[in-house]
Amino acid sequence: MITFFQDVWSILVEYKSYLLQGVGYTMLIALTGTLIGLLIGLITGIIRTIPKPKNLLIRSILKVVNALIGIYVEVFRGTPMMVQSMVIFWGYAFMNGGKTLPLIPAGIFIVSINTGAYMAEIVRGGIISIDKGQFEGAYSIGMTHYQTMLHVIIPQTIRNILPAISNEFVINIKDTSVLNVIGVTELFFFTAKISKMNWKIFETYVVACVIYFILTFTITRILRFIEQKLDGPSSYTIHQSSTMPNEKYMVQMEDQK
């Protein structure tokens, strides 16, 4: 057992540059892919909730766009990311005479469009959860659908779906490991490389497992802290309400002066 821990420590010390580089690329791809995926989800959410226009041509175009979004969501949610990686990466090479995409941008692109398919449904569910009266209230004061979504609905939607966004980010940190099939140099890629260099396969993958756990555990705690801050205090008093008489309110205002 002592020898095992010594081997683990020696791997950390000897190959720390590889491991740090792998962590850096993993976090870059996961974070960027999650943010772009969220943007895709927000755009598709706005489009899919546009009220049916009276113009027949615009209505037909909107129907086609919604159908394409539906196909995109179903295809990317219904196939593994590993297969998507191979199809996109080598499909690009097939159509360009063997010229392949740069690996890191390719990894970000693959994670982004995969995440976007899941975010599209998450955002749609978040928008549906908003009370319809808020749509009607915004429309009644002359706001367009775009203005209503941007200033009224989307801020509330993001707050409601923040736990799901956090979950997608954590999933992406782990799922970047599948990108090693196209040679993306993330953490799993370097782990496999190190194991072939030292032939300490079990010890090397234990190190990778611990690093993945530390990353996901830390990110989860940070995101939960942010969620709690956005929630605000668990209880509060509305000024000049029945729980705070005018006299007490005036005293507080005087104190603030």
Image (tube, rainbow, N blue to C red):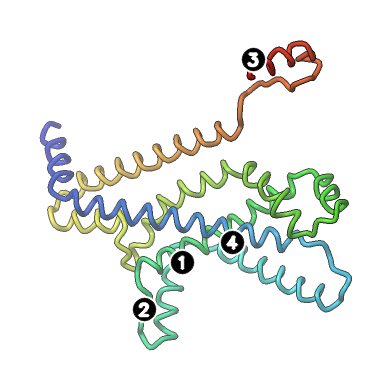
Count residues near mark 1 (Cα–Cα under 10 Å), then give few for <14, some for 14-19, many for 20+.
many
Q: Of the residues shown, which amino acid type is indicated by label 4?
A: Ile
Which mark sits nearer the N-terminus, 1 or 4?
4
Q: Which residue is mark 4?
A: 40
Which mark sits nearer the N-terminus, 3 or 1?
1
Q: Position of residue 60 (x, y in %)?
A: 80, 76
The residue at 12%/43% (across/down) is 10
Instruction: Say what secondary structure mark 3 lies in.
Output: helix
The residue at 38%/88% (across/down) is 97
Q: Which mark is residue 215?
A: none
Q: Which residue is mark 2?
A: 100
Evaluate if marks 1 and 4 touch, with contact meaning CB atoms under 8 Å apart: no
- Asked if residue 159 is positioned above or below residue 138 in the image, the reply reads above
Instruction: Say what secondary structure mark 2 lies in.
Output: loop
Count residues near mark 2 (Cα–Cα under 10 Å), then give few for <14, some for 14-19, many for 20+.
some
For this rendering, which residue is in front, 254 or 96? Answer: 254
Instruction: Say what secondary structure mark 1 lies in.
Output: helix
Q: Position of residue 59 (x, y in %)?
A: 82, 72
Q: Which mark is residue 255?
A: 3
Q: Is residue 106 left or right of residue 252?
A: left
Evaluate if marks 3 and 1 touch, with contact meaning CB atoms under 8 Å apart: no
